[in-house]
């Protein structure tokens, strides 16, 4: 069942539901925000007493519930919002997630969130609704437990002194598209094969009006995507390249954005096999492709004035009597030969053929997302996406988009010297560098195929999957990079 989303001009007194949530900041003296005063007004000073007793200080994630608060809703909750000057839309997104996850655990299903006058803006409203949708998601689509979904939120209402309807509508598209991506990422490899991913993309394109083309193995052979086909040959599952095209009704610039997403539905490593421990997680090696498909779903509904194409190469990296071997030399779509020194460095092999294909479609700017390296997890942990580029202008656009989307990235280097780490005695390039700087040499390898076009590479290996739940989000697939793609597309011209 879909969550109902509303915004209302009613006050906290008049709004119906199981609970009205009022975010409250840490007190630093001075005048209290209007919302805190309103809470005190309707409760004859409950909030001030709470602060005074030390039971509630306004720190993030703290909550206190009042029953029969004398408002129309059955309960009133105050939720810590941290320090007011630090309260960005990203904080609002998290706060809404915390509210949803805490309150649904108490079986409350109709939740209203009050926005302080100062934060009743489209950016905060959008963040709040996105946070609610993201927070309500559980990676349980394959559980048969009849209780599944029972505690999910029925309705989420923003209480604000101004009409925030358009922001709520935008947030619904983005939050639901992010959860669409998360469902794909969460599906295990026996259920989400490359063909199944293509079916999902086709169905989504049909619903949203995107043009969709799926290149099958014969077509990939005809084209000459030797690098991708080499990875795919060890699997009984045939590879695909999914191509989605969004054409705006009117264009503001002649730019053509290409979004590329790595979609390895399972990465065993191939003959250079991975250790058994933790290998089950390699179902999320298609998270870049999932983020791109989620973004295209949102883009099709939000209709920005920019031409956008998506290219999602999808394979299963397996071992078998047909699998590619270390030392094999493949010829990529753009003609360069690559010596496959490690079959586990497969993401870059499928991405280079996708990059060349996107350039042939006429893309003027490229952004890819890929769970590309363990090395980026070593470098940045599970906090920041690693961002690499050959074009500072495009990177600043992507960085700005990531800030408004509330996704964190860190600019990683890509200096010429790193090119020296990629030397093959027998082919134009090897598919791995040496021991050091693994995330950078992977990016450097991709750069060799960008033909000098502006390109940004996002390594999401550390951020696409969370091993532990957080108060605002479930464990598992995050759908990361999807919101940055959407912001990039919608903010491109402005
Ligand atoms: N899919 C992995 C990268 C990865 C690692 C994603 C951990 C998520 C979590 C990628 O295909 C891979 O295996 N990369 C190798 C490259 C190495 C062989 C040069 C790696 O990072 O170990
Ligand atoms: Mn691999
Ligand atoms: Zn991989």
Image (cartoon, rainbow, N blue to C red):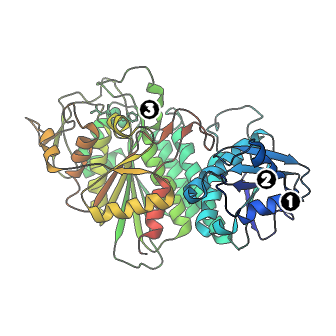
Horizontally, is 376 left or right of 486 in the view? left
Q: Which mark is residue 177?
A: none
* Mark 3, other Cα within 10 Å: few <14 / some 14–19 / many ≥20: some
In the image: residue 165, left or right of residue 48? left
* Sequence-earlier tag: 2 or 1: 1
Viewer-nearest of labels 1 and 3?
A: 1
Q: Say if 196 sits above or below 235 in the image.
A: below
Mark 3 residue CB less than 8 A from any atom of ligand 1: yes
Residue designated by label 1? 16
Q: Which residue is mark 2?
A: 48
The x, y position of residue 444, in whole percent, is 22, 47
Whether 470 is drawn above or below 277: the answer is below
- Residue closest to the eye, 289 or 455: 455
Real-space CA distance between mark 2 and mark 1, rounded to the nearest whole angstrom: 24 Å
Lower position in the chain sequence, tag 3 or tag 2: 2
Which mark's residue is nearer the viewer, 3 or 2?
Answer: 2
Q: Is mark 2 within 8 Å of ligand 1?
A: no
**Ligand 1 quarter of the rendering:** top left
Residue extending farthest top = 276
Residue 66 visible in image: yes
The residue nearer to you, when weighing 354 against 214, is 354
Secondary structure type for disc 2 = helix
Give coordinates of residue 229: x percent, y percent.
29, 40
- Give the spatial CA distance, label 3 vs label 2: 50 Å
Q: Quadrant of the C terminus?
A: bottom left
Query: How many angstroms separate mark 1 from mark 3 (CA)?
Result: 45 Å
Task: Determine which residue is flagged by label 3.
Answer: 282
């Amino acid at each position: 069942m879909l969550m109902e989303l509303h915004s209302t001009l009613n006050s906290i007194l008049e709004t119906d539901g199981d609970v009205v949530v009022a975010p409250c900041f840490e007190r630093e003296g001075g005048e209290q925000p209007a919302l805190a005063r309103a809470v005190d007004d309707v409760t004859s000073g409950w909030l001030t007493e709470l602060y005074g007793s030390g039971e509630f200080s306004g720190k993030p994630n703290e909550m206190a519930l009042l029953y029969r608060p004398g408002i129309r809703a059955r309960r009133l909750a105050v939720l810590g919002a941290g320090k007011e000057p630090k309260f960005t839309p990203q904080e609002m997104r998290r706060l809404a997630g915390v509210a949803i996850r805490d309150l649904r655990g108490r079986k409350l299903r109709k939740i209203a969130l009050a926005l302080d006058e100062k934060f009743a803006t489209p950016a905060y409203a959008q963040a709040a609704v996105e946070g609610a949708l993201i927070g309500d998601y559980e990676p349980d689509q394959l559980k048969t437990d009849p209780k599944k979904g029972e505690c999910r939120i029925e309705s989420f209402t923003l209480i604000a002194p101004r009409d925030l309807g358009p922001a709520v509508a935008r947030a619904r598209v983005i939050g639901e598209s992010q959860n669409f991506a998360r469902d794909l990422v969460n599906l295990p490899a026996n259920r989400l094969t490359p063909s199944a991913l293509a079916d999902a993309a086709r169905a989504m394109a049909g619903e949203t009006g995107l043009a969709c083309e799926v290149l099958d193995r014969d077509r990939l052979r005809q084209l000459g995507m030797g690098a991708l086909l080499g990875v795919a040959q060890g699997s009984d599952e045939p590879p695909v390249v999914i191509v989605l095209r969004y054409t705006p009704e009117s264009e503001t610039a002649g730019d053509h954005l290409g979004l590329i997403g790595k979609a390895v539905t399972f990465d065993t490593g191939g003959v250079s096999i991975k250790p058994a421990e933790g290998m089950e997680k390699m179902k999320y090696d298609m998270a870049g492709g999932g983020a791109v498909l989620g973004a295209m779903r949102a883009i099709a509904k939000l209709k920005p004035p920019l031409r956008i194409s998506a290219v999602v190469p999808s394979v299963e990296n397996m071992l078998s009597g047909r699998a590619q071997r270390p030392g094999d030399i493949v010829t990529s779509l753009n003609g360069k030969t690559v010596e496959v020194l490690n079959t586990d460095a497969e993401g870059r092999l499928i991405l280079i053929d996708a990059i060349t294909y996107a350039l042939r479609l006429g893309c003027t700017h490229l952004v890819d997302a890929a769970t590309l390296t363990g090395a980026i997890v070593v470098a940045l942990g599970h906090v920041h996406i690693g961002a690499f580029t050959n074009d500072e202008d495009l990177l600043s656009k992507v960085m700005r988009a990531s800030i408004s989307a509330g996704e964190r990235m860190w600019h990683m280097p890509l200096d010429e010297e790193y090119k020296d780490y990629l030397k093959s005695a027998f082919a134009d390039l090897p598919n791995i560098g040496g021991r050091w700087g693994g995330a950078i040499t992977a990016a450097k390898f991709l750069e060799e195929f960008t033909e000098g076009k502006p390109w940004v590479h996002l390594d999401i290996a550390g951020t696409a999957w969370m091993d532990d739940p957080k108060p605002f989000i479930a464990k598992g697939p995050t759908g990361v990079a999807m919101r940055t793609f959407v912001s990039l597309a919608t903010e491109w011209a402005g």
